[in-house]
Amino acid sequence: MPRSHPPTLLTLATRTLREECHVERGLTIACAVSGGPDSMALLDVLARLAPKLAFSLVAHGVDHGLRREASGELDLAERHAQSLGVPFERTVLAVAPGGNLQARARAARYAALEAALRVTGAGLLATAHHADDRAETVLLRLLRGAGPRGLAVLPARAGERIRPFLRARKADILAHLARHGVPFAEDPSNRDRRHQRVRVREELVPLLAELSPGIVEHLNALADALGAGADTPALDVGPIPLGRAQRRLLARAISHRQREARIPLPGGRVLGLDSVTLKPRLLAQEPPRKP
């Protein structure tokens, strides 16, 4: 029977953790939490999935020292973490007001989170970026004149950073919060149109959605394709085309250092990993099948 409803946030996150983040059993994941809706949903989802996927979970929040409300928002996150049985720690920073504030605060936040990763012994850092975030980032990069590599943003896994919500929409997150009664706080700066990202979110994306209702999915597919092509060798006939299943196989092969991996491509071609560098390369063409 066909599905009568779309997959839940729990289902979407489970697929992404298994197929694209390649989370191994026994690993510890550190969840970045701010108290906002996205990160509170991530904390809740990872806590629910930890027993099923056999990983351990800790949570960490960062107070940039820029808003008085931030401490209370992290208090909210800490209470929910405690209710879920998840250890919670926080870092308090002092980011000075001034130019390029968002970029400086983001850099300071990731530095603090990576330090927490080392202290807790966690192997991965999970952030709550979702499909709408990724679409906005592609548009922001386009507005700044980025090329193909610059548009291959926010993959499901990049080194020790993972994004379990990458295949979920903001609506999926809000539905989970409502369904499970997860508390959260709203940061008013996320509505401040002095920030370019806010204008992209509230003005540009809705306009594009009027012209193309699937624009968020299209922009995510573009980032996927460019991300796959970034490490894919070029042929005389153009870049090697990879479907989603082939990209997943390639990502898994690289993550697990599978030097013997052989990924079939159109036209009888085969993609594998270089035995020394582990970079994707075109292998010898498969012989044609006899009719």
Image (tube, rainbow, N blue to C red):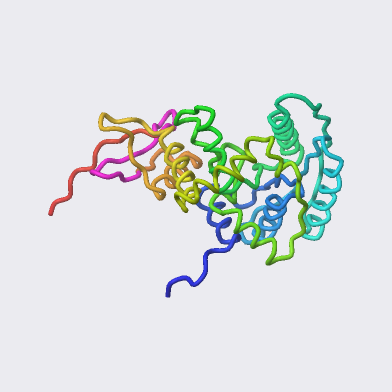
Is residue 102 found left or right of 268 in the rendered image? Answer: right
Quarter of the picture containing the C terminus is bottom left
- Which residue is the extreme one toward the bottom? 1
Q: Quadrant of the N terminus?
A: bottom left
Q: Quadrant of residue 65?
A: top right
Write the residue at 59% across / 50% down.
164
Q: Residue lying at the far top in this picture: please name it.
A: 99
- Mark yes or no: residue 22 visible: no
> In front: 178, or 251?
178
Name the residue nearer the viewer: 110 or 284. Answer: 110
| Residue situated furthest left in the rendering | 291
Nearer to me, 111 or 185: 185
Q: Position of residue 12 (x, y in %)?
A: 55, 58
Please tell me in which quadrant of the rendered image residue 263 appears: top left
- Residue at (36% x, 31% y) in the render: 233
> Where residue 91 appears, x then y in whole percent?
82, 38
| Residue segment shown in magenta | 263-279
Residue lying at 37% horizontally and 47% vertically, measured from the top left: 243
In the image, 241: left or right of 129? left
Does 155 sit left or right of 185 as displayed? left
- Magenta residue check for 269: yes
